[in-house]
Amino acid sequence: MSHDERIDVLVAASRAERWIGAAIDSVLAQRGVALGRLVVVVNGSPDGTEDIVRRYPPPVFCLASPEAHSAKARNRALDASDAPLLTHLDADDIMPPDSLACRLRALRAQDAEMVAGRVLSFRDGQPLPADCNAPELRAWSKPAKLLGCSLMRRSLYDRIGRFDESLVGTEGVDWVMRSARAAVQVAAVDQVVLLRRLHPESMSQTRAVQLRHEYLKLLRRHVGEGGSS
């Protein structure tokens, strides 16, 4: 495997002791790629998340911050990474075993700056499918330009910029919208690359009002001020 194809996986984790182990294990189980660093920034988490992450040896690296701020955590993880290819994973989500390999193949084949695959949601406690790309599950998955579904070249962060720390929770959406406005070449991966866990403790549930205000802010920024994403 070429040194130039090392992939770092970046995770911002807060109050994730129930799920972070499964997320890390799913990254370490990736097949057919040169995994670089798995950088987990534990931010403002009073539970046992940090203790769980620190049990893992390299390539898992744990950084801790007392502030519960996902955008700052993502930027800190970015600073701690050094691979030419990057992706992100939410602390409560899971990568299927060939997730990174199929993204890397698409990046190579289409000489793209970024690739995005499909996401399949599941409810917390629900058994995971043996094959998340099985035909009977096709209607339940969907293409998504989420950070967790993507693989991008590090050079994109030089062009698009880092995560906006004035946002807390929608910084990933903002970054993807900025990449669209910059006409980033995105290749599609027609496979499920992310299993997204649905549970009542997710940010979309616990900070729903704040997130709605931030989404309105993003609409004004990217559409109302002359942007066209």
Image: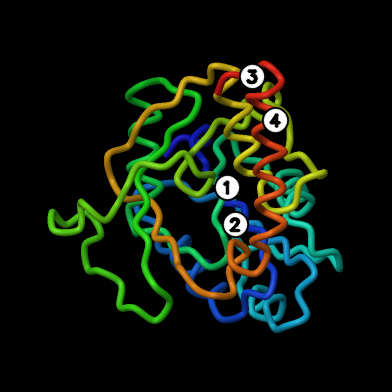
Residue under the point 68% across and 59% down: 209
| Callout 2 touching callout 1 (CB < 8 Å) | yes
CA neighbours of label 1 inside 10 A, class few (<14), some (14 to 19), many (20+): many
Q: Which residue is mark 2?
A: 38
Q: Which residue is mark 4?
A: 220
112 lies left or right of 102? right
Nearer-the-camera pick, 138 or 129: 138
Q: Mark 4 falls on what kind of element?
A: helix
Q: Nearer the viewer, mark 1 or mark 4?
A: 4
Q: CA distance from mark 3 to mark 4?
A: 9 Å
Q: Mark 1 falls on what kind of element?
A: strand
Residue under the point 13% across and 58% down: 136
Q: CA distance from mark 2 to mark 4?
A: 35 Å
Q: Mark 3 falls on what kind of element?
A: loop
Q: CA distance from mark 1 to mark 4?
A: 33 Å
| Callout 1 touching callout 4 (CB < 8 Å) | no
Q: Is residue 19 above or below residue 132?
A: below
* Mark 2 vs 4, N-terminal side: 2
Q: Nearer the viewer, mark 2 or mark 4?
A: 4
Q: Residue 89: where, in percent of width, then height?
A: 54, 55
- The residue sitting at the left extreme is 135
Q: How many marks?
A: 4
Q: Which residue is mark 1?
A: 8
Residue under the point 77% across and 39% down: 164
Quarter of the image for the C terminus: give it.
Answer: top right
Disc 1 marks a residue whose amino acid type is Asp
146 lies left or right of 103? right
* Mark 2 vs 1, N-terminal side: 1
Disc 4 marks a residue whose amino acid type is Arg
Label at residue 227 = 3
Q: CA distance from mark 1 to mark 3?
A: 31 Å
* Mark 3 vs 2, N-terminal side: 2
